[in-house]
Amino acid sequence: MKKLFSIVAFLAFATAGYAQSDDFGIWTSFEAQKKINKKVNISLEGELRTRDNVSTNDRWSIGLDASYKLTKWLKASVGYTFLYDNNERISYYEVGDKKVESGAVNAGDPKKRAEYWAPRHRFHVSLTASQSFGNLEVSLRERWQYTYRPEKTVSQRWSYWDEEWDGEEHSYRGKGKNVLRSRLQLEYKLKSLGLTPYASVELSNAWDVEKIRYTIGADYKITKQHAFGLFYRYQDIRSDDDFETEPNMHILGVDYKFKF
């Protein structure tokens, strides 16, 4: 427990030191797992995320996953996640706009902003290869995911020029997106302490690398059924065509797992 508290203190210190320059959020999750047999597992997970230095609820989600152990070192899984996002979508003045041509504004200045909650539907298929070297385990997960964002109509948008809501409906069309997520992870099992520290790096690719996530954390096994986890994650945004580019983010994560 003392080692776990030391890790908690280190992660909190790292987060406090970095969050001043980039965004900071807290991610919390609960996962229930059921082992059907030696090869098949199913799990249900709920998650809540914050952003804007924890001042805004970013999204909540609930997902179902099923995995099958193909061999001793290879596992396959499929899953679906329902996501409900808090969106802030900004449009910008472009060359050719009347106000740009007249010199009233510059190309790239913010034009209108919409704020709304909306759903997304995500499906994934994964293959995870792992190899143990004593207490050390090395794993590589390749995950294809498809996310569909349904069409959304908002009742009004904020006009930066008029400094008021425009009172006009605006629709954002539906959109699907494919992403390949590649994660390399190292974990070391301290069985006598019930503690498993780990570190990972994950790349999200959609023709180009859109984001890289660097994670360090630890899971603590309280009993055979209950486990608690804590991690620090740095999310490095390279490109993102969903809306405008997100800021880089420092994340403190807390999760709880229950097996039955």
Image (spheres, helix red, strand yellow):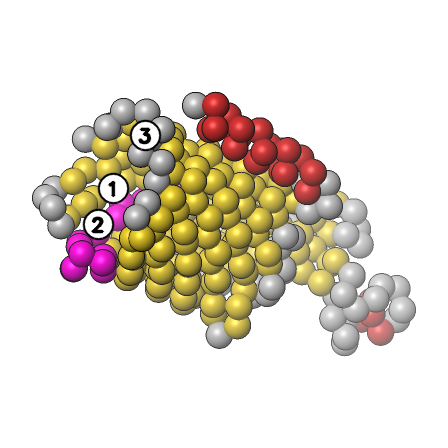
Mark 3–mark 1 distance (CA, rounded to whole Å)? 26 Å
Q: Position of residue 7 (x, y in %)?
A: 52, 32
Toward the viewer: 235 or 45?
235
Residue on which disc 2 sits: 66
Is residue 151 in view from this perspective?
A: no
* Mark 2 or 1, nearer chain start: 1
Image vertical order of residue 88 relative to residue 180, above or below: above
Pointer 3: residues within 10 angstroms few (<14), some, or many (20+)? few
| Helix, strand or loop at mark 3 | loop
Nearest the camera: 188 or 69? Answer: 188
Residue to which mark 3 is pinned: 192
* Secondary structure category for the residue under label 1: strand
87 above or below 111?
above
Asked if the residues shown at circle 2 and circle 1 are in contact, with their CB atoms under 8 angstroms apart, the answer is yes
Quadrant of the frame with the C terminus: top left
Q: Is residue 64 within the magenta segment?
A: yes
Start and end of the magenta stretch? 60-75
Q: Report the residue at 48% width, 56% height from top.
A: 201
User: Which amino acid type is marked by label 2?
Assistant: Ala
Three-letter amino acid code at the position of disc 3: Ser
Which residue reaches farthest right? 103
Q: Tell me residue 203's x, y (percent).
A: 48, 62
Q: Mark 1: give few (<14), some (14-19) or many (20+) Cα within 10 Å.
A: some
Report the residue marked by disc 1: 43
